[in-house]
Amino acid sequence: MRYAIKICYDGTAFNGFAIQPNKKTVEGEILRRLIKTKIIESRSKNKFQYAARTDKGVSAFGNIIAFNSPANPLKAMDGIQNIWITGYAEVDEKFNPRHAKYKIYRYYIKNDGLNLNEMAKAIKIFEGIHDFSSFARIDKRNPVREITKTFFHAGKIIKIDIYGKAFLWQQVRRMVAAIIKVGQGKACINDIKNALNGKRINFGVAPAKNLVLMDVVYDKIKFKKITPDELILKKEMLNDAIKKMI
């Protein structure tokens, strides 16, 4: 049986998602538990795959892992520190979590007198197919990507949602850095347009801790939802802490 599992994790507790020697990572902790409990024999033999390789400090509410196993893995994965299961589905043997319809990233920004109107205009410029060489840490991959849609939620805490099928290394954080500079008056919308049209401009990189992979969406796969008790408790504790400070 092949399982697709939706996971939530606190990225600030890990050195990124992908396994690294002598470092605590999301993938490393999950694989360690699955192998220890004999749910899988190895990463390769059980075709362990994931949807998104989030950077150090980036959290997720809906990243996806998938692997083959003769036994249901949910109980075995319960209790991994700072990683929670929020859904699962039984999928076809050929299912690869990287082949998603789209991914949704959300970035949270404290509104310290930013120009919201200009920021809302700036985010829309990224929609469509562009060369993101000025908005990513470039490796050997093709820098052309498509942003299918964006949303700007104004308020005391600004939320920026970015939808796309595939992203480059640091792409979302560099896009957000440019939008913040527009909001601060340190850059203008034409600067972003020029960067997308080939002019190399370094807008910086927004902090990883405010970025969350909200969800990964697929055609024809419906996940059975799970609400971890630990997250419910954490929510109530944080709510009480905020009420006490107000």
Image (cartoon, rainbow, N blue to C red):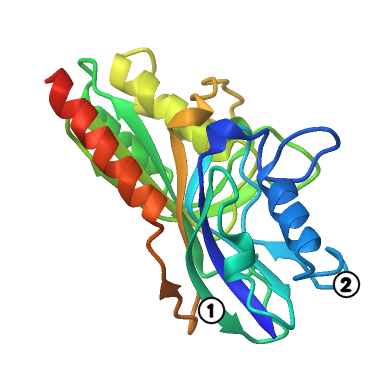
Q: Give the answer, above or below, for where 162 lies relative to 36.
A: above
Residue 199: % across, % down:
59, 27
* Residue drawn where x is 63% and y is 70% of the image: 99
Is 116 left or right of 71, judged from the image as shown? left
Q: Give the answer, above or below, for where 222 lies relative to 115.
A: below
Residue 29: % across, % down:
70, 48
Q: CA distance from mark 1 to mark 2?
A: 20 Å
Q: Give the residue type that dot 2 points to.
A: Lys
Of residues 189 and 202, which is closer to you in this image? 202
Looking at the image, is mark 1 or mark 2 earlier in the sequence? 2
Residue 92: quadrant of the picture: bottom right
* Residue drawn where x is 45% and y is 43% of the image: 212
The quarter of the image holding the N terminus is bottom right
Q: How many marks?
A: 2
Q: Which residue is disc 1 drawn over?
A: 89
The quarter of the image holding the C terminus is top left
Of residues 234 and 45, which is closer to you in this image? 234
Q: Give the residue type that dot 1 points to.
A: Ala
Density class for disc 2 (Cα within 10 Å; few <14, some 14-19, many ≥20) is few
Q: Give the answer, above or below, for where 161 lies relative to 4.
A: above
Is 68 left or right of 152, judged from the image as shown? right
Residue 167: % across, % down:
59, 49
Is residue 87 in view? yes
Q: Which residue is disc 2 drawn over?
A: 45
Of residues 168 and 129, which is closer to you in this image? 168
Secondary structure type for disc 2: loop
